[in-house]
Amino acid sequence: MRNLIQFILRYKDFFLFLTLQVLALYLLFSANVYHGTVAHTVARDYVAGMQQTRSSMREYFQLRQDNQELARQNQILLNRQRNSYRRVDNEYMIVDDTLMLIQYRYVPAQVINSSITKQKNYLTLNRGKLDGINPNMGVVTEQGVVGIVRNASRHFATVIPIINVSFELSVQTKRGNHFGLVRWDGKDPGYAFVEDMAKHADVQVGDSIVTRGASAIFPPGLLIGTVDEVEDIPGSNFHQIRMKLAQPYRNMNHVYVIQNALRQEQLDLEQTP
């Protein structure tokens, strides 16, 4: 208390000035309509600005939770889409109904590291074997195919994206079901090439390129990209197709890893002599 009294006595002139200044401003704004209106407007704008700033900060700190909730909802929607199921009519006796067994499950994951400027680009995910992630699982987003899981530890996984010169995937045109292989030439991360598609195949600019579902990695019909250019080289039996990738790799944060419940059964059967 003694220190407070000493502080007030030390700065008494300043406090007197401040009190008289506030009183003068009060008399000015209360006695003059124009000055009072200006003061009210300034105060209102200041309060509104502070509220907007507080709201923006609240929204910013809420982004992480919002993104997690969106990923959870997208996971539910992806797991419910029709190509995640297979028919089981021949395995059960049913009456006036169609049974469906889920074959593909989508596990949300976050990209915590990546590259797009190398010949062999990669992604690192914050999910691993403890989350059911294993090598040779497909990775997608809502926009399209991203790549294939290469390795997995207990808590993390690495992914070979399409923009890796080692990547290769069997695909088809959505419109005509013509088969080909997707490869990347190591140049533009926004484009890849569809090779080994016969010249007699009717392929046009704007056609969608989708997964075949033949590798037990992706369900059929997932978008990979759209045809950007078709060139026929003399002497070759195949189209040279340039494709714009559906999923941009810059600033990609959230993905989904596809678990195929019947993958091992298919692989074991195909390896049987």
Image (tube, grey):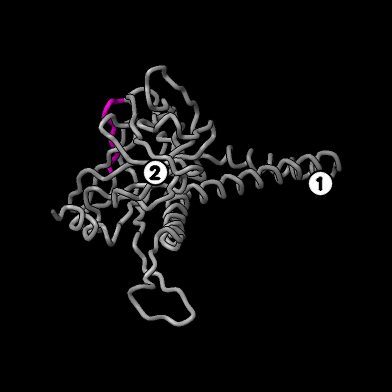
Element type at mark 1: helix
Mark 1 is surrounded, within 10 Å at the Cα level, by few (under 14), some (14 to 19) or many (20 or more) other residues, namely few
Instruction: Tell me the magenta residue range.
Output: 118-124
Q: Amino acid at mark 2?
A: Val
Question: Against 202, is 81 above or below?
Answer: below
Residue tagged by mark 1? Answer: 30
Element type at mark 2: strand
Q: Say which of 212 and 17 sits in front.
A: 212
Q: Say which of 45 and 8 sits in front.
A: 45
Q: Which residue ends up furthest to the left in the rendered image?
A: 273
Q: Amino acid at mark 1?
A: Ser
Q: Which residue ends up furthest to the top in the rendered image?
A: 234
- Main secondary structure along the magenta-highlighted residues: loop
| Earlier residue among tags 1 and 2 | 1
Residue 147, percent across and down? 33, 41
Residue 36, percent across and down? 80, 43
Write down the quadrant of residue 1 in the picture: bottom left
Q: Residue at the location (39% across, 43% down)?
A: 145
Residue 216, percent across and down? 29, 52
Residue tagged by mark 2? Answer: 145
Q: Residue at the location (48% across, 44% down)?
A: 174
Frontmost of labels 1 and 2 is 2
| 209 on left or right of 21 | left
Q: Is residue 36 in view?
A: yes
